[in-house]
Image (cartoon, rainbow, N blue to C red):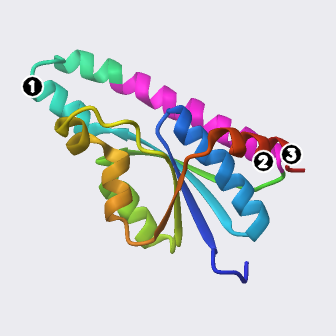
Amino acid sequence: MNGPIKHILVYLDGTEESLTAAQYAICLSKATGALLSAMYIVNTRALNDLVKSHIFIESEQDEYQRDLQEDARKYLRLMEKMAQEKSVAVSVYEESGAVQGVIRDFIRNNDVDLLVSGKVSNIRSRRDELNNDTERVIRNVSCSVLVVKDEERVWEMFDQMA
């Protein structure tokens, strides 16, 4: 861990893009010896917005939140499994709250110097752009950000890694 990268955080959101980012983060951690952390955030801010706009009633919010928490556990277990297959240690974190704030605080409190993220999904409208958590995080965190895009190359690199 004497290189420029000492602590990597990969943000998982359940998308294929975030799983590709996870694979790349594992490869990067192994190559650099950097600590690796993975985080999945249950976006309670978005859930509250759905209740306020009467898309969900409160009982539906609770059920949906439980589903999201189960998704978080599933993706974090997958991250642990992928890292273990490549003999890379990973610390996983299931959090809840506003995505940007949770990631910002984690980076600040844990000396993260690189955030690895999947590519931003295609923006179809100005509203999508304003509501895209991944893009907001990429634009506003204090550390360097690596956006992983070349899915096929990453999968190949991950598969070939011992």
Amino acid type indicated by mark 1: Ser
Q: Is residue 67 above or below residue 1?
A: above
The mark found on residue 13 in the picture is: none
Q: Is residue 70 magenta?
A: yes
Which tag, 3 or 1, sits closer to the chain's start? 1
Which residue is label 3 attached to?
A: 160
Q: Secondary structure at mark 3?
A: helix
Q: Is residue 2 left or right of residue 8?
A: right
Q: Is residue 97 above or below residue 14?
A: below
Which tag, 2 or 1, sits closer to the chain's start? 1
Counting from the top left corner in percent of width and height, residue 49 is at 16, 33
Which residue is label 2 attached to?
A: 157
The mark found on residue 53 in the picture is: 1
For the residues marked 3 and 2, what is the alpha-carbon distance in whole angstroms?
5 Å
Which stretch appears magenta? 65-86
Amino acid type indicated by mark 2: Met
Name the mark nearer the viewer: 3 or 1.
3
Local crowd size for mark 3, using a 10 Å CA cut-off: few (<14), some (14–19), many (≥20): few
Q: Is residue 157 magenta?
A: no
Please say if the residues under marks 3 and 1 sit with CB atoms less than 8 Å apart: no
For the residues marked 2 and 1, what is the alpha-carbon distance in whole angstroms?
44 Å
Residue at screen point 42% across, 28% down: 68
Residue at screen point 72% across, 83% down: 2
Report the quarter where the N terminus lies: bottom right
